[in-house]
Image (cartoon, grey):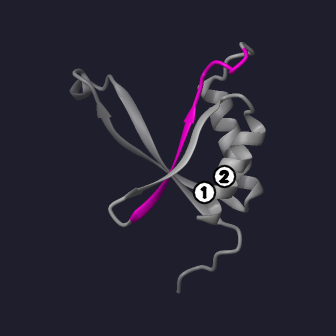
Amino acid sequence: MEVARDFSAGLQSALPGHISRNDVEKVGGTELRVIDLRKQHTYGGSEITVNQFHCQLFRILDNMGYSLCATLPMARRGPLSALGYGTRQELLVFKSANSEALA
C-alpha cells in the first residue's frame, strides 16, 4: 500500500481542504484506499474542476516515477450509446520508470 499511501499524501498536499475522507477499507481479502474529494473547499475557497484534479493526479504519479503508457477507450454508456452519443470512460495504463521489459 506504499503507492496508495504516497498518492493520498500527495493529494492532501496538492488539494488542501478538498479531501473529506482518506480511509483504508477491506473488501473481501483486498485492502482499498478510499479518497473522497469535495468540489468546494472546506472554508469556502475556490472550487476544483475535473481538469485540475486530473492535472494533480498525473503530476503526483509522475513524481512517484510512473508515466502514462496508454489509454484504452471503453464502450459508451447511456440510452443513445448505439448512436454514438453518451459518456465514454477510458482505462489509463501507467508504466513505472524502473520496471523492466518483459522478455
Q: Is residue 8 left or right of residue 103?
A: right
CB under 8 Å between callouts 2 and 1? Answer: yes
Q: Secondary structure at mark 2?
A: helix
- Seen from the viewer's position, the closer of residues 74 and 25 is 25
Give the residues drawn in magenta, as a range: 30-43
Is the residue 53 above or below the residue 101 in the image? Answer: above
Whole-number angstrom distance, CA of label 2 to CA of label 1: 5 Å
The residue that mark 1 highlights is 4
> What's the residue type where badge 2 is placed?
Phe
Q: Any mark on residue 19, and which?
A: none
Q: Is residue 70 left or right of residue 42?
A: left
> What's the residue type where badge 1 is placed?
Ala
Instruction: Please tell me which residue is depicted at 69% across the width and 42% down the height of the picture.
Output: 11
The residue that mark 2 highlights is 7
Instruction: Please tell me which residue is depicted at 33% across the width and 24% down the height of the picture.
Output: 86
Is residue 36 magenta-colored?
yes
- Seen from the viewer's position, the closer of residues 99 and 85 is 99
User: Residue 98 placed where, x, y %?
Assistant: 70, 74
